[in-house]
Image (cartoon, helix red, strand yellow):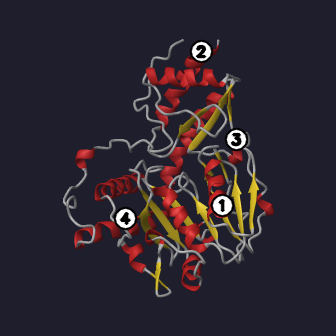
Amino acid sequence: MRPETKPANPNFSSGPCSKRPGYDLAALPTESLGRSHRSSLGKRILKRACEQTASLLGLPEGYRVGIVPASDTGAVEMALWSLLGQRPVDVVYWESFGQGWLTDITKQLKLPDARAISADYGQLPDLDSVDFDRDVVFTWNGTTSGVRVPNGDWIADDRKGLTICDATSAVFAMEMPWDKLDVVTYSWQKVLGGEGAHGMLILSPRAVERLETYTPAWPLPKIFRMTKGGKLIEGIFQGETINTPSMLCVLDYLDALDWLEGIGGVEAAIARSHQSLAAIERYVASNPWIHFLAEDPALRSNTSVCLTLDAEPEQVKQIIKLLEQEQVAFDIGAYRDAPAGLRIWCGATVEPADVDALMPWIGWAYEQVVK
């Protein structure tokens, strides 16, 4: 039967993601708009974004947080081009974005000793085969596969190389073992539902030491340069951005941080995400035609939840289109490189009740198209 209740918010896109509950653009402060980001006001706001991020995430002493250009992709590229080359590197991937970092490392940087450790969509590579005498590049959560690393136990405490982690769909939604992560990147547009175009770069003291003692063999574009005269440009991590940021986007990010703090911080955000995942798990358990792409529950993402259906790819497209026509769910198709299916965002800004309301509609659409 056609469900009676629709999600109050049908935005389940995996990026840009749903704005926080109660979001109101008109409520953002505007005094910094039209002002220089290098004014005392602009610097104060940008510095607050860095400091409030570090506080909410509970970063260890000595870790730096900076706002950088070009979203999560820009932050990862900045790390790869600035830090790699001193040691051999292991690239661990199991979906398209992680594979993209391998392409950059082997075809752009052309590092001679880069080893790929990979697995198909829905699976996780053999993490025990990672060599921590080498630098290691990996995603914490495979946004396009719905597979995440279960924890940080596989990362060596006595590693000699750096761990460089693309965590854009994990930060603020999953427990992160910060002491095992030397570089972490993310963007505002994921878990906190912020606006795009800006990346966040978190560096450990070990990463800073690498920057100050190693110079890559290749030239670095201006927007990648984090040192001057062999020393870290500390201003980057105190709100003095390399290039001009959108102050409106920064204010939007601060609004999201304030909301997160108001609901109880990262712990509460993680709980909301798991509540949404649980709603999907209940539905999948009782319907044999829908499946998690990640079969192992321990590896299952609680943000980018990827599902497959007992349906042909064209039928999956029809189901997605029908749900959009009904204004029940927007932008839930699987990523273009992933197996045909659905991808439902369950980050903290999504109401678990909306996910619960969505699932019967997926069943209804499946009945209309397949049966």
In primary-sequence order, the first of circles 2 and 1 is 1
What kind of element bears circle 1?
A: helix
Q: Residue at x 44, y 35 (%)?
A: 11
Residue under numbered circle 1: 107
Q: Residue at x 47, y 88 (%)?
A: 229
Residue under numbered circle 2: 369
Question: How far is the residue under mark 1 from the one under mark 3?
Answer: 30 Å
Identify which amino acid the numbered label 1 is placed on.
Lys
Res. 49 mark: 4
In primary-sequence order, the first of circles 3 and 2 is 3
Q: 318 above or below 52?
A: above
> Where residue 13 appears, x then y in whole percent?
48, 38
Is 7 situated left or right of 158 in this image?
left
User: Alpha-carbon neighbours of circle 1 within 10 Å: few (<14), some, or many (≥20)?
Assistant: few
Res. 294 mark: 3
- Is the Cβ of the residue at disc 2 closer than 8 Å to that at disc 1? no
Q: Residue at x 62, y 38 (%)?
A: 306
Question: How far is the residue under mark 3 from the one under mark 4?
Answer: 34 Å
What kind of element bears circle 4?
A: helix
> Where residue 134 appears, x then y in whole percent?
73, 72
